Image (tube, helix red, strand yellow):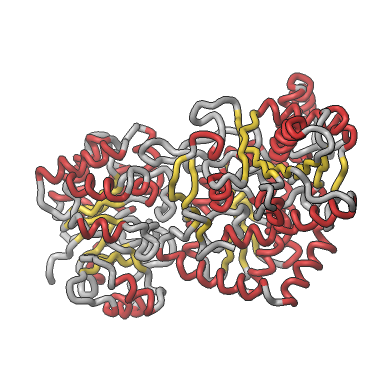
Amino acid sequence: MSNKGYFGEYGGRYVAEVLRRPLEELEAVFESALTDSRFCDEIEAFARDYSGRPTPLLFAKNATREAGGADIFVKLEGLANTGAHKINNAAGQALLAGRMGKSRIIAETGAGQHGVATAAACARLGLECVVYMGEEDIRRQRPNVYWMELFGAEVRPVTSGTRTLKDAVNAALRDWAASWENTHYLLGSALGPAPFPDMVREFQAVIGRETRDQLTAARPAASEPDALVACVGGGSNAIGFFEPWLVTDDAGRPLLVGAEAGGRGSDPGDNAVRMAGAGCLGVVQGYRSRFLTDADGQVLPTHSISAGLDYAGIGPQLAHLGETGRIRFVAVSDRSALEALQFFARTEGLIFAMESAHGAAAALDVARELGSGRTVVVNMSGRGDKDIFISAAALDGAAWRAFLRSESEREEPA
Amino acid sequence: MKDPRIVAHLVAGYPSVDASKEVARGLIDGGAFALEIQIPFSDPTADGPAIEEACRVALERGCSVKEALGVVREIRRESDVPIFLMSYANLVVAPGIDRFVRSARDAGATGLIVPDLSPGSDDGLYLAADDARCRAVPVVVPWITKERRSEVLDAPIDWVYVALRRGITGTYTDLGPEQEVFLSSLRTPGVSVMAGFGIQRAQQVAALVPHADAAVVGSEIVRAVANAPAGGEGEAARRIVESLRGL
């Protein structure tokens, strides 16, 4: 847990007075829920019956052989219902909202996975749901908009600023400032003002705890894994996946690696590399962390092939752990992520979400670096079905565009 | 009835750096008691659509913090109205809080409004601003607890800014008994009260006059500036302050 909302010098609760009380109330309810066995039972039942937990841990033997290094295991978190780890946190917070007597949920979404998970949890729990999504992200992730609406959520396009995730967060914060009496803001990443970073990590820690048990079962004689790798946008899958290993053993193991979006290059605006690149200390959207900003402190636009990593800030606990050296951050380019997507599809029959494919690319590098006889686990935080418009266009552009044209020209059925 | 004191808001650099100086002059000519000059920030989470859009346009046209402070400096040379400089935490912490506070004071600011650095979570802003004699102005809301209200009023301040309605700037507020009671609960020796959020008309200003030392008008002025013809921004600003004063 944080120290009064701080992880080292990062974190905190930098909000206008209007949001102080709702955050204090949320913190109190969250802390009491954690020690309430009835609440924990509700979470477990939801995870088992709806989300499909535990998600499998796969030994990727073909990938291991081809990569020629450490044994590669893949945590198939993308097999969770709704297609990504996001459901763990969405379910946890939606159940918490019920406990607070709040009937309306608002959320921001980038890739749309958090929006889909939130909309699904709200459908299941009978809560009203409004999802803010940047216009640019709606264009990139149209299929997820369709699913959210099918779940009965209202998707509100955000047309301000860069029209991506950060602007959706701003819009949700504004809604909440006016609506907190009956509304819970279901933030999707391990960032924002306290208590969100602690809360999201706790709800996502199930990924790491399961992985640890599954590894022990798969290799009873072996000790801990040598490395764990996850992609990092805001960082919710990474912090949940790493959670059991945040404190090292005496040898400083295991190695924890966070893969940031290297995008299309190192120029400002071409990537979202906060830790392994040009991030500056800042206070934005309610928390202190490392952000991509200009010299004045204005938040810069970012780029990634994956909407979910395309964000200028990073969760405060991850920033702290990066600074202390506990987590190694690497930048993975759009191209490397696409190559890793193809590699695991061909060798293992897995389609990584474009976000998670950044982790996959980093895991291949780490496996080669560690060499055989070692173990590396990568979190496939989401599956890539949602990315078909991006991956097909990037990998098979002409044929895909021809298909879309012919589909759009088809007569509507009578 | 006494002439209502209006704290008139503008976004530096909107619609351009020069035009925003004309807006400031127009607001002063119209009889504004003080100016609230906002340095545009990329993520203005406490502002509504009108001010957010003005910030976006100002930034797109290249308004830096230095240029925004230049607007303050130029207006200060021409007038001695109080100038409250408003912005968000990241523009204050990026150069270092002490340095930011000194540049604001040297440019001629009277006080600082930074809604996401509130007393106790301010990283030292309130003390630095007190040292520089350019004190920070906390923003409070009617539903804060008594303990929190005392904590805020104990900070080194000359003014407190009351956000009268739930939520963000730019939507209509009626002044009800609940708000009046809250405003009177803030009466503290040495601390003046400015109240705003949602003030669009002279009747609202007049209703506030008995309960607060000044009325803050933001989005309504920014909308008037946005709707003014090019070159007419200063005149539009003057007219709206006059009309809010009931003239």
Q: Residue at x 61, y 57 (%)?
A: A130
Residue A93 in which image quadrant: bottom right
Where is residue B17? Give x, y as percent: 26, 36
At x 64%, y 28%, the residue is: A333
Say left or right for B105 vs A412. left
Could you tell me which quadrant the C terminus of chain A lies in? Answer: top right
The picture quadrant where one finds residue A391 is top right
In the rendered view of the protein, which quadrant contains the N terminus of chain A? bottom right
Please determine whether, in this image, residue B217 is positioned above or below residue A126: above
Task: Give the image quarter of residue A107.
Answer: bottom right
Tell me where residue A143 appears, x and y as whole percent. 72, 42
Identify the residue shown where x is 47% and y is 55%: A286
Vertical side of B108 occupied by B16: above or below: above
Query: What number of labels is visible?
Result: 0
Residue at the farthest top position = A398
Left or right, residue A333 beside residue A376: left
| Left or right of B68 on screen, residue A336 | right
Q: Residue furthest front?
A: A250
Task: Please tell me whether residue B64 is drawn above or below residue A246 in the rendered image.
Answer: above
Who is closer to the viewer here, A168 or A295?
A295
Asked whether the viewer can see residue A178, the reply is: yes
Looking at this view, is B50 or B80 the one in front? B80
Does the image show residue B235? no
Q: Residue at x 32, y 35 (%)?
A: B63
Task: Return the x and y of residue A353 as percentages of the image width and height.
Answer: 74, 39
Whole-percent x, y for residue B168 in the image: 41, 59
